[in-house]
Image: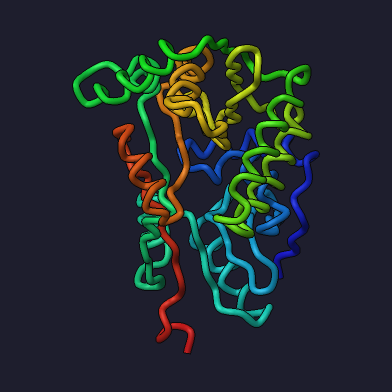
């Protein structure tokens, strides 16, 4: 039986290098994602004879694709047996198309796979986000130009010295959206505060915009691997037309040019969020899949 425990901040030292070695672009392959959302989703880790397993949820829990393994056939068999021994149905989530192909090769005709469109990640060209060149970004350039013409603003990187300004923006965002979005606002705010409280320890990077000296927008993220940067949070106060476009472009242009891609996470099935993410013309929709064991095999 696999012995899982809660993920802790101290695990970053050994787990982060393993996550990077997977070379995947998914948001769940960033340690910060697992850590800052771990309180809400109960992210757990298990080390066993050189293999590393991750899961989320209580009992029953859902398995991620193994982070380190020797023989995938044996590792998947151990995971299936672990769920059976604990008395719940086996389920995995977050796999890419390449990973489900590996699973099907390792244990043919064993799994039923389903795509999770709402949980799939939007991947963008960093160069395109920073420059907004081309006809497809004409509306974005116009929006950004209007913001720059209307407001006297400054951009700066996030440090511990201006973290309180970011938190102040988050506090206002929370109060403005609590009635409309309900519990999801509190969950995101708690994750955001875990990020702000552990900013340096998690190796996060961020940007902040001020208008007339007042902090009005910020963004936080982290490196998934040397090619891909992940955006965790992007918040802006109401009343400043074009502010979200500005923080997006400024952060990409000032801080992310060494990365080829930017992962801006999933849309969670929210129509407005999906429309917004598509409007920036992703170069890839990184599809995520779930897996269960075929019923006839489990009988």
Tell me which corner region of the image, top left, top right, bottom left or bottom right, holds residue 223.
Answer: top right
Q: Name the residue: 35% across, 25% down.
A: 125
Q: Name the residue: 54% across, 68% down.
A: 77
Q: Name the residue: 62% across, 40% down.
A: 173
4 in relation to 13, above or below: below
76 in relation to 52, above or below: below
Q: Residue 294 appears at what percent x and percent y? A: 41, 78
Is there any visible trace of residue 48 in the rendered image? no
Tell me which corner region of the image, top left, top right, bottom left or bottom right, holds residue 262.
Answer: top left
Q: Residue 19 appears at what percent x and percent y? A: 59, 39
Which residue is most to the left?
A: 135
User: Is 118 left, or right, of 68 in this rendering?
Assistant: left
67 in relation to 291, above or below: above
Q: Nearer the viewer, residue 259 or 144?
A: 144
Q: Nearer the viewer, residue 44 or 154?
A: 154
Is there any visible trace of residue 206 in the rendered image? yes
Q: Nearer the viewer, residue 191 or 218?
A: 218
Q: Residue 216 appears at what percent x and percent y? A: 60, 25
Q: How is the image coloured?
A: rainbow
User: Is 66 left, or right, of 23 in this rendering?
Assistant: right
Instruction: Give the quarter of the figure containing the N terminus.
Output: bottom right
Q: Name the residue: 58% across, 18% down.
A: 209
Q: Residue 172 appears at what percent x and percent y? A: 66, 38
User: Is 245 left, or right, of 136 in this rendering?
Assistant: right
Total numbered labels placed on residues in the image: 0
């Amino acid at each position: 039986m696999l012995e899982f425990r809660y993920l802790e901040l101290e695990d970053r030292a050994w787990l982060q290098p393993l996550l990077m070695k997977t070379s995947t672009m998914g948001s769940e392959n960033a340690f910060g994602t697992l850590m800052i959302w771990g309180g809400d989703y109960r992210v757990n880790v298990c080390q066993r004879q050189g293999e590393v397993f991750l899961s989320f949820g209580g009992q029953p829990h859902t398995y991620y694709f193994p982070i380190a393994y020797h023989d995938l056939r044996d590792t998947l068999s151990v995971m299936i047996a672990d769920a059976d021994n604990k008395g719940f149905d086996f389920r995995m989530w977050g796999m890419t198309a390449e990973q489900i192909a590996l699973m099907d090769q390792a244990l043919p005709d064993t799994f039923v796979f389903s795509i999770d469109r709402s949980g799939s990640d939007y991947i963008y060209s960093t160069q395109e986000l920073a420059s907004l060149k081309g006809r497809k970004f004409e509306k974005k350039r116009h929006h950004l130009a209007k913001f720059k013409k209307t407001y006297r603003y400054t951009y700066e990187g996030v440090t511990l010295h201006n973290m309180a300004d970011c938190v102040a923006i988050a506090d206002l965002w929370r109060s403005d959206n609590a009635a409309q979005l309900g519990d999801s606002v509190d969950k995101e705010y708690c994750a955001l505060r875990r990020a702000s409280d552990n900013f340096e320890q998690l190796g996060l990077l961020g940007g902040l915009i001020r208008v007339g000296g007042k902090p009005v927008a910020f963004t936080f993220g982290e490196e998934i691997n040397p090619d891909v940067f992940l955006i965790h949070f992007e918040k802006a106060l109401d009343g400043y037309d074009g502010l979200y476009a500005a923080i997006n472009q400024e952060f990409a242009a000032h801080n992310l040019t060494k990365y080829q891609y930017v992962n801006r996470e999933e849309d969670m099935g929210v129509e407005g969020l999906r429309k917004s993410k598509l409007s920036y013309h992703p170069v890839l929709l990184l599809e995520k899949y779930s897996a269960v064991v075929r019923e006839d095999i489990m009988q």
